[in-house]
Image: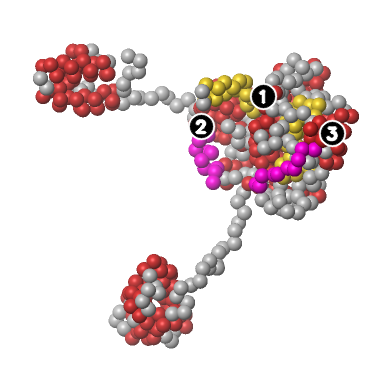
Amino acid sequence: MGRQLSMATRQELVGAIGARYTAGSREEKRRILDEFVAVSGYHRKSAIRLLAGAPVAQVAAPRGRPRRYDAAVREALVVLWEAGDRVCGKRLKALLPSLVDAMERHGHLHLDAGVRERLLAASAATLDRLLAATREAARGHRRRRWGAASTLRRNVPVRTFADWKDPPPGYVEADLVSHCGGIASGSFVHTLTLTDIASGWTECFALVVREAALVVQALTSAREVLPFALLGFDTDNGSEFINETVFAYCQDHHIEFTRSRPYRKNDQAWVEQKNGAVVRKLIGYDRLEGLAAAATLARLYAASRLFVNFFQPSFKLASKTRVGARVIKRYHPPATPCARLLASQAVPEATKATLREVAAKLDPILLLEQIRAAQRELVGGEPGDAPRPAVAAAAELGKFVQSLSTAWKAGEVRATHRARPTAPRHWRTRVDPFDAVWPEIRQWLEAEPDRTAKELLERLGREQLGAFPANLLRTLQRRVKGWRQAEAQRLLFTGPTTPLATRVMSAEPKGEEVLAEVVAR
């Protein structure tokens, strides 16, 4: 039998067919017994005793295994999860060895040997399970139309997702992310994202406007900071890329210039993924405009490029197989872009030595603190471009490290993703149906304060046929409730000046009871 039934399922099966077995004929019993043995896996003699009504042995409750991951492991894991910018369990599993080593080397973390061993031995699923409660507590366009293809666009060859194969480091996809806040009018800041196909190395540049000359300037800066030579430049069909300025720059510097098919975002799947996982995760969807916002964004990217490329593991597609309508995707184990470059045979040893030297000096907590500070500045916080004294910077960094263990209690830690406070709504969205007849209703209430809103609505319906249907009851109840509250306030603070107050005060033995009733209504 391929798959055995649980004990609870077997007992339910005995209860379901036991009565039929007992009341059946000899032939029926044999047939039922054959089916029961085939389904349940019981021995034939055991099945006869069970179906004949013999008492079923009680199954002892499982005792369970002793807890392996205690509170100390969970606390350390929360700190490391925050330090890794809240990545998923699979990416965190790949990040933990280097992150723990970096934090201990810089004095941000001191783990017991047993806690460290269990933490590094935990699987990705275990990490997700341990962080489940923490994550739960922490939570809370128009299609662009183009004209006829120009001669320049026809001179730029098309490259699809399937055409990449396995290129060496240096072939990048590029895309522009607009920070318009949902309003495309006016001038606003853009982000130019460059993603290497081979390693996933990502560089982001802040552009104060969408302009070809700034794209060329960003490419010049990228060639200076990338750990490999820029060999290929693949873009979409936007006019900021498909123009004489960018085309001439790529030709002059021997950069292979290609483009995707129009309206096919999957052709640029590598950079589109980074637009969400890097840019939108850091910046959000608010509107940014002006030189000051672009300068702050540039400082944020200066810190995030090191944090993302050295301490943020990512997945890379290994193979994709189609079986009918189903597509099966296989991925390589998560690795940082730096780790992929170190493992690549196409990267020179001198470049690898430089990457190792840079990685040894980087402090992930300091980078994350700088990212958080820039995010606060983007949403209107204090400017952070002024250098801080070394003592003050160390003190701030110490406070930030201490806050990692409790940051999840406050929910969203990224200032760029926090919900903005909204003004209380005090206006109506439709005309009040009782506005014209309210003086008359008020007279009825002053004469008979005990009348309910339903009785008043029925009286209005009798006097004005069809003008006030029953679905207006809730609206009238709100108005009556407001009137009674106002009358109660007037009675308490200004004395008995209304007919209702006179009625309440005249009932000397039961004045407090009537007042309580009025307030309740």
Q: Main secondary structure of the magenta part?
A: loop
Mark number, residue 247: 3
Magenta stretch in the rendered image: 130-150
151 horizontally vs 466: left or right: right
Q: Secondary structure at mark 2?
A: helix
Which mark sits nearer the N-terminus, 2 or 1?
Answer: 2
| On screen, residue 165 above or below 302 | above
Amino acid carrying label 1: it is Ala
Mark number, residue 162: 1
The quadrant holding residue 246 is: top right
Q: Residue furthest front?
A: 148
**Which residue appears at 44% of the width and 80% of the height?**
437
Q: Residue 518 in the image: x percent, y percent?
A: 37, 75
Q: Nearer the viewer, mark 2 or mark 1?
A: 1
Which mark sits nearer the N-terminus, 3 or 2?
Answer: 2
**Which residue appears at 70% of the width and 36% of the height?**
262
**Which residue appears at 86% of the width and 26% of the height?**
254
Amino acid carrying label 2: it is Leu
**Which residue appears at 76% of the width and 47% of the height?**
189
Q: Residue 283 in the image: x percent, y percent?
A: 68, 44
Name the residue beneath numbered marker 2. Answer: 130
